[in-house]
Amino acid sequence: MKQTSTLSEKIKQFSYILIPILITQLAMYAMNFFDTMMSGQYAKNDLAGVAIGSSLWVPVYTGLSGILLAVTPIVAQLVGAKKNKEVPFSVIQGIYAGVSLALFVLLIGSLALEPILQSMTLEPEVRSIAKHYLIALSFGIIPLFVFNVLRSFIDALGMTRTTMIITLLTLPINVIFNYLLIFGKLGMPELGGVGSGYASAITYWLVTFIAIMVVHRQKPFNQYHIFKRLYAISFKKWKEIFLLGVPIGMSIFFETSIFSAVTLFMSKFGTEVIAAHQAALNFSSLLYMMPLSISMSLTIVVGFEIGAKRAQDAKAYSKLGLTTSILMSSMSGVILYLFRTPVSTIYSEDTIVIGLIAQFLVYAIFFQFSDAILAPMQGILRGYKDVNVTFFIALISFWVIGLPLGYILANYTAQGPFGYWIGLISGLAAGAIALSFRLFAVQKRKTSEIATTPSDF
């Protein structure tokens, strides 16, 4: 990354960072899609088992891995401040912290997985597939968390295209191992849906190995000598990572787990409604990759500019990111409204389900507008290392406003299942408004601090 002085330079640099992140997110989304789709092609019980396993794993993974996103603003600000010698120590401590989180997940999983699955009303075969799918996945948890740290380091340098290439290389590997282990091809054991768990674990090891080789050998990463020496564990640095990362991770957890909760509440409305809700939510998650990618890009560029004590440039990037997000979401909203029925037919051939999906997708349009503001603001504030207030806003928006309001509308008004979506949209809108005030206050304070602080350069 480099300093920019004009709007056109900022657009060019921001696009250079954003586009690979977007492609990377889509590729990672595709891995989960292929796991589910190929398991469904094997048998319906395998599809159900993998779906249950994924619904338990995704909120936990996104929440805990979100903690490691703290490495991105930490490294971005160090690089912006030209403190490159401090980078390897921070990255290695991030890896140590990632391994500790992975071990924590394995410990809790070994104790809680069986009781959780037993508490759910599942057919024995589905419960068994879900259990063994998660056990298979667990063999790749440690390298997955290590990769998240290395990805944060790579992205913090603005080299998001490298992450994109690594992820795209591993996507076909994941699909191939899915095919071999789910269906038992080329002498491999026929494991059904459980095979997709082992395929993912193998993919996690490969993607981490590739990332280590890239960081160790390729420019500009090898100039930081990340693996040149073995640092002792520094709980002081862990404290910095966790103080910054825990609010980020918990904010992500609150946002992802709310949809799992809504899905459980939806069960009273029947199979067609559940299927339509899941399909619309799946497509909404695909569209969410755009504001999410913009959010991650903003954390990098804002962190870099704040580290270099260029408050006005950080504000300029913030405006650019928000404008881009709103424009892109407006375009996707119009397209979604016009093509909501054709999109619905992708997921089902049942006319009732198709009609319900199309109705849910209308509400998904309003999701897009709220996410277009909320997600980028979260990324901007992370770039400023301001995360605690964001955490509380996420908690209140989703669990104090969104879910209770949705429950009331769904169960005590004529809105029915759509009431949950109205509640979540209201929570998102409330969060976006609250974050707007927080961002204004943080930018004003940071501008004042930098103006009164002597420059290091």
Image: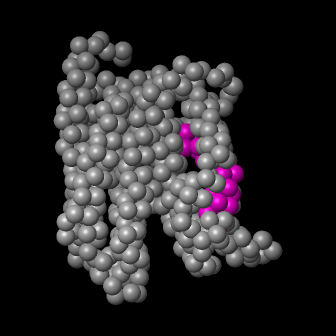
| Residue 349 falls within the magenta-colored stretch | no
**In the rendered view, how is the structure colored?**
one colour
Q: Which residues are magenta?
A: 129-149
- Quadrant in which residue 261 is drawn: bottom left
Name the quadrant of the C terminus: top left
Q: In this image, 224 relative to 78: left or right?
A: right
Name the quadrant of the N terminus: top left
Residue 91 sits above or below residue 139 on the image? above
Residue 266 showing in the rendered view = yes
Which residue is painted at 21% across and 50% down in the image? 429
Which residue is painted at 28% across and 45% down in the image? 400
Which residue is painted at 45% across and 56% down in the image? 25
Percent coordinates x, y for residue 230 in the rendering: 69, 25
Residue 196 showing in the rendered view = no
Which sits in the foreground, 190 or 108? 108
Percent coordinates x, y for residue 135 in the rendering: 68, 55
Residue 359 sits above or below residue 12 on the image? below
The tally of labels here is 0
Which sits in the foreground, 306 or 131? 131
- Quadrant in which residue 6 is drawn: top left
Percent coordinates x, y for residue 264 in the rendering: 42, 62
Magenta stretch prevailing secondary structure: helix
- Quadrant in which residue 439 is drawn: top left
Residue 414 sits above or below residue 203 on the image? below
Percent coordinates x, y for residue 112 in the rendering: 61, 48
Q: In this image, 234 relative to 71: left or right?
A: right
Q: In this image, 270 relative to 6: left or right?
A: right
